[in-house]
Image: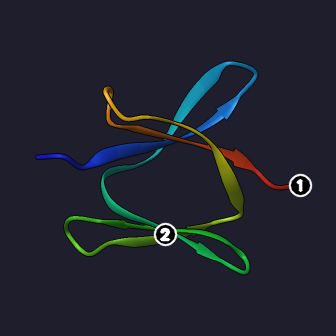
Amino acid sequence: MCEANAYFIENGEETLIMEAVDTVAPEPEGILLTSIFGDQKLVKASIHSLSLVDHKVFLQKKG
């Protein structure tokens, strides 16, 4: 499978937000994450970086 895990990145620390993320979509309020199981989570964040080889999406909280 090619899904990724999404993390908040803060002070160099990773905090898991969601596993098995299939889609990452921008929304006016933040980022909408959808898993391969259909679970959705809207987070007030912006994309910090992606690690495609490691299947990781790093998000930065919006203040």
**Residue furthest top as drawn:** 12
- Distance of label 2 from label 1 (alpha carbons): 18 Å
Report which quarter residue 58 is drawn in.
top right
Q: Residue at x 18, y 46 (%)?
A: 2
x and y, in percent, of residue 20 in the image = 26, 51
Does residue 27 appear left or right of residue 2 in this picture?
A: right
Which residue has dot 1 on it?
Answer: 63
Quadrant of the frame with the C terminus = bottom right
Q: Is residue 32 above or below residue 12?
A: below
Neighbor class of circle 2 (other Cα within 10 Å; few <14, some 14-19, many 20+) is some
Type of amino acid at the residue the image marks with label 2: Lys
Q: Residue at x 36, y 43 (%)?
A: 5
Q: Is residue 32 above or below residue 6?
A: below
Q: Residue at x 31, y 45 (%)?
A: 4
Neighbor class of circle 1 (other Cα within 10 Å; few <14, some 14-19, many 20+) is few
Q: 19 or 25: nearer the eye?
A: 25
Label 1 SS: loop
Does residue 41 appear left or right of residue 3 in this picture?
A: right
